[in-house]
């Protein structure tokens, strides 16, 4: 899904652990990263501040959406 970042969750070392994103229809998605993804939390925040979208690939596991890949 592609959308605008509303919130970035990170560990203390700039590792992205979660995102909240709004898609074009206005739906808000909450994602969790169980494994380290290539995008840093600071890079995600840059997209948030600039109003740029991100493309998130994910798997649904129970009630959680797990990030598998993030691209600009």
Image (cartoon, helix red, strand yellow):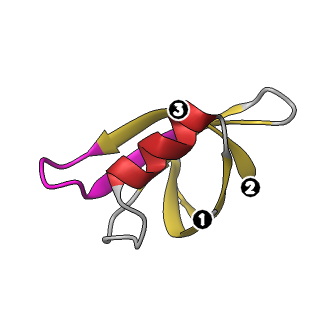
- Dot 3 or dot 2: first in sequence order is 2
Report if residue 18 lies within the magenta region: yes
Residue 14: horizontal and vertical position, in percent?
Answer: 23, 54
Mark 2, residue position: 1
Res 35 quadrant in image: bottom left
**66 sits left or right of 3 in the view:** left
Q: Nearer the viewer, residue 67 or 59?
A: 67
Q: Is residue 65 above or below residue 26?
A: below
User: Which stretch is magenta?
Assistant: 10-20
Mark 1, residue position: 58
If the image is split into quadrants, where does the N terminus sit? Answer: bottom right
The residue mark sitting in front, 2 or 1, is 2
- Dot 2 or dot 1: first in sequence order is 2
Circles 2 and 1, Cβ within 8 Å, touching? The answer is: yes
The residue mark sitting in front, 1 or 3, is 3
Residues under labels 3 and 2: Cα distance?
Answer: 19 Å
Which label belongs to residue 49?
3
Element assignment for label 1: strand
Which residue does the image show at 35% across and 51% down from the upper left? 41
Which residue does the image show at 33% across and 64% down from the upper left? 34
Report if residue 17 lies within the magenta region: yes
Residues under labels 1 and 3: Cα distance?
Answer: 23 Å
């Amino acid at each position: 899904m592609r959308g605008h970042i509303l919130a970035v969750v990170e560990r203390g070392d700039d590792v992205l652990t979660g995102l909240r994103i709004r898609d074009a229809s206005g739906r808000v998605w909450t994602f969790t990263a169980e494994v380290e993804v290539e995008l840093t939390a600071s890079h995600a925040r840059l997209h948030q501040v600039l109003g740029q979208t991100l493309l998130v690939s994910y798997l649904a596991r129970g009630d959680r959406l797990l990030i598998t890949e993030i691209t600009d």
